[in-house]
C-alpha cells in the first residue's frame, strides 16, 4: 500500500457512494540536468520526488450500456445508447472544481469546464488511441467516476501536470483492463500532451513511470528507456520555489513551443546547409541520411533530408564531420567545442525571421509551416524573432553536460567530495546556459539561484520549463538544515513579511528531496 491509498479510497467512497476499482499514483520529478533537450532527442537526468498525483477510479453503479466496446483494430471508441461521461472531482475542491466530461475521441473541453480537466481529457484520448492500436476492446459498463488528489506543487516546474496525466491514464487502463508496460504508457502520455497544447519530449512522463528509489535516472528516447545513475554518497538536493508560477501550457505559443519551433527550424536549416556544403566539397558529412531517403536524385535527397529533420540530435554527427573536415584542423578537440564552432559558422545571425529561414531552405513560409504541427504553427504566428544559433548552442552543450554528469557519478577514481564539486559546476553551467542562450529563466529564478549559492550550494539551477517555478540546489547532506534556514531568511522572509506567502506554505516552497520510486497502480 502506498501513501494516501486508503485515505483516498475512503474519500472516494464518501464522494461517490462506492469503492474505487483502482488507485494510481504518479510522482512528480525534479530534473537535475538536461533542460529543454528531451524534445530534441537527447537524454536527460531527472529523479522522481515523493510528491505525487493520485487518481482513484470506478464504474458508476447502476447505469450500463453507455458505450460499446471498440472493435478489434479500431482506434476510436464506438458509441451506442446514451452518451458516456466521466464524473470528475478533486479532494481540493475549492481549488479544483468538480464536473464531468463527455467521453468520445473527438471530445472538446466545454467552455465552462474547469481548466484542469484538459489533462484528464488528454489522458482519455491517449488511452483510447493506445487501446485501438493494441486492438484492445474498451469495456462499456457505465459512466466513469474519478477522484484526484495530489501534492506536487502546481506551476513549480516539478511536472504536476504530467503526473496528473500519467495517473489518470494508469487509472483508465486499469479500469478497462488494457495491459501496458511503463514504456508504452510513457509513450502514450507523451504523445497525448499535444491535446493540452504543448510539444514536450517525454522526460516528465518517462521518469514518473520508470523511476527507481535512491537513484537518478538517465532517460533516453527513441525508444524511451531509463538507466539508474547512482549519486555520490552524501549528496542532498533541495528544491526551492521562486514564487513566480510557471504556466507552461497557458504561455506555450510565446515561450515553450516557441523554443521547440526555434530548435526544429535550427535543425532543418543546419541539415540544409550541411548538405549543400557536402555537395560543394565532395564530402559525405550531412548527406548520408539524405541518400538513404531516396534514390531519385541528389537534389531531391537533400530536399527530403531537411524536411525530415525534427530533432537537433539528427544533425549532430554531420556537424562534427563538418568541424573535423576543416583545414587547418580546429584547435578544439572536444565535441562540445566543435559543435559550438560549427553552429556559429553555419548560423551566424543573432536572429532570423520565418521568411529568412524559408528563403535559406529554398521554400516559401507557407510551405515551411505546412511541415509543422499546429502548436508550432501557432508559435510561428506570434511573429517573434527566431534565435536559432543560441537555442542550438544550448541544446548541444546541455546534452554534453548530461553525459558528463553521468560520467562523474560513475567515476570510481573520484572521491565523493570531488564528485559533488564537479556536479555542482555542471549544474551552474546549465543554469547559465538556460538563462543566457535559451532565455527561459526569469528575475525571480536568477535571484533564488544566487541566494542558494550564497547559502553554500555547490551548484544550483532552474528545473523544469523555466519562466518561473523551482530551483534545484546540490549540497552536502550535512549542510542541508543550515542551508535551508539561510535561504528561508534571505529569500522567503521578505515575502512572508509582505503577506505574499503564508508561513504554512513555506514547507511546500522549500524542501529537501530524495530520489523516489516510479508510478504504481493498486487494484482494490
Image (cartoon, rainbow, N blue to C red):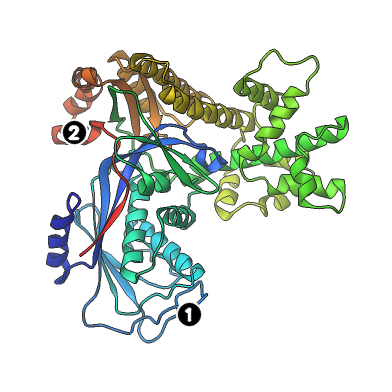
103 with respect to 342 (left or right): left
- Circle 1 SS class: loop
Answer with left or right where residue 380 lies relative to residue 465: right
In x, y percent, where is residue 225?
Answer: 47, 45
> At x 55% / y 28%, what residue is drawn?
394
From this viewpoint, is residue 83 visible? yes
Q: Position of residue 474 (x, y in %)?
A: 33, 23
Give me the residue at 19% from left, 56% from top.
91
Residue at mark 2: 507
Q: Which residue is mark 1?
A: 71
Q: Quadrant of residue 146?
A: bottom left
Tag of residue 258: none
Does residue 327 appear to the left or right of 423 in the view shown?
A: right
Closer to the camera in the image, 62 or 99 = 62
Q: Nearer the viewer, residue 319 or 151?
A: 319
The location of residue 190, given as percent across then percent down, is 46, 52
Mark nearest the camera among 2 and 1 is 1
Across and down, in percent, residue 429 comes to 47, 20
Q: Is residue 319 left or right of residue 166?
A: right
Q: CA distance from mark 2 to mark 1?
A: 50 Å
Q: Secondary structure at mark 2?
A: helix
Residue neighbourhood size for the residue with mark 1, other residues' Cα within 10 Å, grouped as few (<14), some (14–19), many (≥20): some
Amino acid at each position: 500500500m502506498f501513501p494516501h491509498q486508503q485515505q483516498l479510497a475512503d474519500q472516494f467512497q464518501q464522494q461517490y457512494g462506492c469503492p474505487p476499482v483502482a488507485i494510481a499514483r504518479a510522482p512528480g520529478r525534479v530534473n537535475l540536468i538536461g533542460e529543454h533537450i528531451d524534445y530534441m532527442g537527447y537524454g536527460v537526468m531527472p529523479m522522481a520526488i515523493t510528491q505525487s498525483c493520485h487518481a482513484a477510479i470506478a464504474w458508476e453503479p447502476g447505469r450500463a450500456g453507455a458505450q460499446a466496446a471498440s472493435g478489434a483494430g479500431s482506434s476510436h471508441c464506438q458509441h451506442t445508447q446514451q452518451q458516456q461521461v466521466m464524473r470528475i472531482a478533486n479532494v481540493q475542491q475549492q481549488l479544483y472544481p468538480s464536473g464531468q466530461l463527455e467521453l468520445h475521441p473527438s471530445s472538446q473541453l466545454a467552455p465552462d469546464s474547469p481548466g484542469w480537466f484538459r489533462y484528464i481529457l488528454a489522458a482519455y484520448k491517449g488511452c483510447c488511441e493506445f487501446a485501438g492500436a493494441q486492438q484492445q476492446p474498451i469495456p462499456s459498463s457505465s459512466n466513469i467516476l474519478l477522484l484526484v488528489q495530489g501534492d506536487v506543487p502546481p506551476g513549480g516546474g516539478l511536472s504536476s501536470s504530467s503526473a496528473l496525466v500519467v495517473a489518470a491514464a494508469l487509472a483508465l487502463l486499469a479500469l478497462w483492463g488494457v495491459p501496458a508496460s511503463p514504456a508504452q504508457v510513457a509513450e502514450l502520455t507523451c504523445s497525448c500532451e499535444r491535446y493540452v497544447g504543448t510539444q514536450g519530449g517525454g522526460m516528465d512522463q518517462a521518469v514518473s513511470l520508470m523511476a527507481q528509489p535512491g537513484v537518478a535516472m538517465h532517460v533516453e528516447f527513441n525508444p524511451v528507456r531509463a538507466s539508474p545513475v547512482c549519486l555520490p554518497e552524501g549528496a542532498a538536493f533541495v528544491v526551492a520555489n521562486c514564487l513566480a508560477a510557471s504556466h507552461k501550457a497557458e504561455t506555450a505559443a510565446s515561450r515553450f513551443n516557441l523554443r521547440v519551433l526555434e530548435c526544429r527550424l535550427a535543425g532543418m536549416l543546419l541539415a540544409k546547409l550541411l548538405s549543400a556544403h557536402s555537395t560543394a566539397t565532395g564530402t559525405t558529412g550531412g548527406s548520408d541520411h539524405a541518400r538513404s531517403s531516396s534514390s531519385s536524385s541528389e537534389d531531391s535527397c537533400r530536399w527530403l533530408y531537411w524536411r525530415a529533420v525534427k530533432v537537433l540530435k539528427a544533425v549532430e554527427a554531420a556537424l562534427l564531420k563538418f568541424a573535423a573536415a576543416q583545414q587547418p584542423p580546429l584547435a578544439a578537440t572536444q565535441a562540445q567545442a566543435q559543435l559550438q564552432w560549427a553552429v556559429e559558422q553555419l548560423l551566424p545571425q543573432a536572429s532570423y525571421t520565418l521568411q529568412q529561414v524559408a528563403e535559406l531552405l529554398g521554400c516559401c513560409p507557407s510551405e515551411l509551416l505546412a511541415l509543422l504541427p499546429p502548436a508550432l504553427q501557432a508559435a510561428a504566428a506570434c511573429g517573434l524573432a527566431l534565435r536559432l544559433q543560441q537555442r542550438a548552442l544550448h541544446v548541444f552543450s546541455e546534452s554534453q553536460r548530461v553525459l558528463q554528469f553521468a560520467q562523474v557519478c560513475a567515476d570510481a577514481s573520484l572521491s565523493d567530495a570531488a564528485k559533488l564539486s564537479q556536479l555542482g559546476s555542471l549544474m551552474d553551467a546549465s543554469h547559465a546556459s538556460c538563462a543566457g542562450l535559451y532565455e527561459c529563466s526569469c528575475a525571480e529564478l536568477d535571484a533564488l539561484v544566487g541566494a542558494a549559492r550564497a547559502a553554500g550550494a555547490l551548484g544550483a539551477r532552474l528545473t523544469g520549463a523555466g519562466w518561473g517555478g523551482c530551483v534545484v540546489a546540490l549540497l552536502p547532506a550535512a549542510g542541508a538544515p543550515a542551508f535551508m534556514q539561510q535561504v528561508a531568511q534571505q529569500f522567503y522572509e521578505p515575502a512572508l513579511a509582505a503577506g505574499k506567502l503564508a508561513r504554512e506554505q513555506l514547507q511546500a516552497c522549500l524542501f529537501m528531496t530524495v530520489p523516489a520510486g516510479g508510478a504504481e497502480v493498486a487494484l482494490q
